[in-house]
Amino acid sequence: MATDGDAAQTTRDDIAHVLAEALPFMQRYAGETVVIKYGGHAMGDRTLSRQFASDVVQLKLCGINPIVVHGGGPQIGRMLERLQIQSRFEDGLRVTDQATVEVVEMVLAGSINKGVVADIQAVGGKAVGISGKDGSLCLARKLERIRRDPDSNIEMAIDLGFVGEPDRIDPGLLETIIHSDAIPVIAPIGVSRTGETYNINADTFAGAIAVAMKAKRLMLLTDVAGVLDQDGELVSELDPASIDELVASQTISGGMIPKVESCVGVVKGGVEGVIILDGRVPHCVLLELFTPHGVGTRISERRQDT
């Protein structure tokens, strides 16, 4: 019959095994920068959001430099409804007029940003909440989209309003923060050369930050497990050539196509690997970085064995 002492010994052995397995990965990432795009269901679930905050603090304690970029589409939508401001989408992007961009900035740089900061500090960390407008972090330009009319075959420009993309990232402010004991939490808002505020897709913003900061990893938390094969199984490793094959075979389709194409651009920009992973998995950040096989799909220049 098992005794309480046996159970305690088993628990100690399990803990020792986990720590021994994680140690080489902690050493691999020590001193490195990891950018994490935080959004989706994980942000709206209280338990998951607290676990995410705990993971980020653990990274900082291990000598890693985490940078958090957050989204907030559902929260923006709810606030627009409350204020009775109509909004519509083009190619998955919210068309943003002057009234809408003011709400976007209020929600992203206000309530959401400070909520993430509060979560991190509630579990013992120190966080600084900023947007891309602070310290001239993100100089933005208007995002241009072209649509081809299926009948006339004529290309037409789509006016998305105050939707932008990063033009230049000045990493100075982030360098100052990460070399302190604080964790930067960034709202994806940029400012143009003439002072206009632009709403920027959080994945795109996080990718630009990762390239500018020469990050070792960019992690994109989503509401899917990662890239799936034709049998619905997770593909753990992808390189640009294999992505092209999966797109051609329509294994990768729909909204996942621009996501993986964006990931390839980030990798070509110098980031060693981009991971698409399920933010609904408890402690997914630690599992991805500190275990041999991770829990998502890693995109890198070449498929790796480790």
Image (spheres, rainbow, N blue to C red):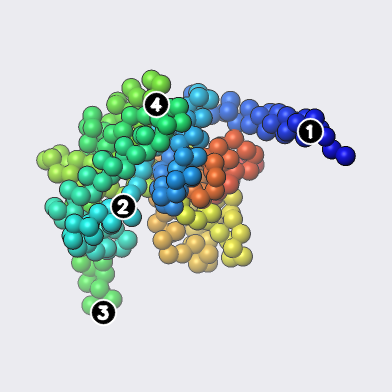
Q: Pick whichever of labels 2 and 1 is earlier in the sequence.
A: 1
Locate residue 179, reporting x and y percent.
39, 21
Q: Quadrant of the C terminus?
A: top right
Dot 3 crowding, Cα within 10 Å, few <14, some 14–19, many 20+: few
Locate residue 60, reporting x and y percent.
47, 27
Dot 2 crowding, Cα within 10 Å, few <14, some 14–19, many 20+: some
In this view, the residue farthest toward the top is 180
Q: Amino acid at mark 2?
A: Gln
Depth check, mark 2 against mark 1: the one in front is 1
Locate residue 301, reporting x and y percent.
51, 44
Depth check, mark 4 against mark 1: the one in front is 1
Label 2 – label 3 distance at C-alpha: 37 Å
Q: Amino acid at mark 1?
A: Asp
User: Callout 1: helix, strand or loop?
Assistant: helix
Q: Is residue 95 above or below residue 175?
A: below
Q: Residue at x 43, y 27 (%)?
A: 125
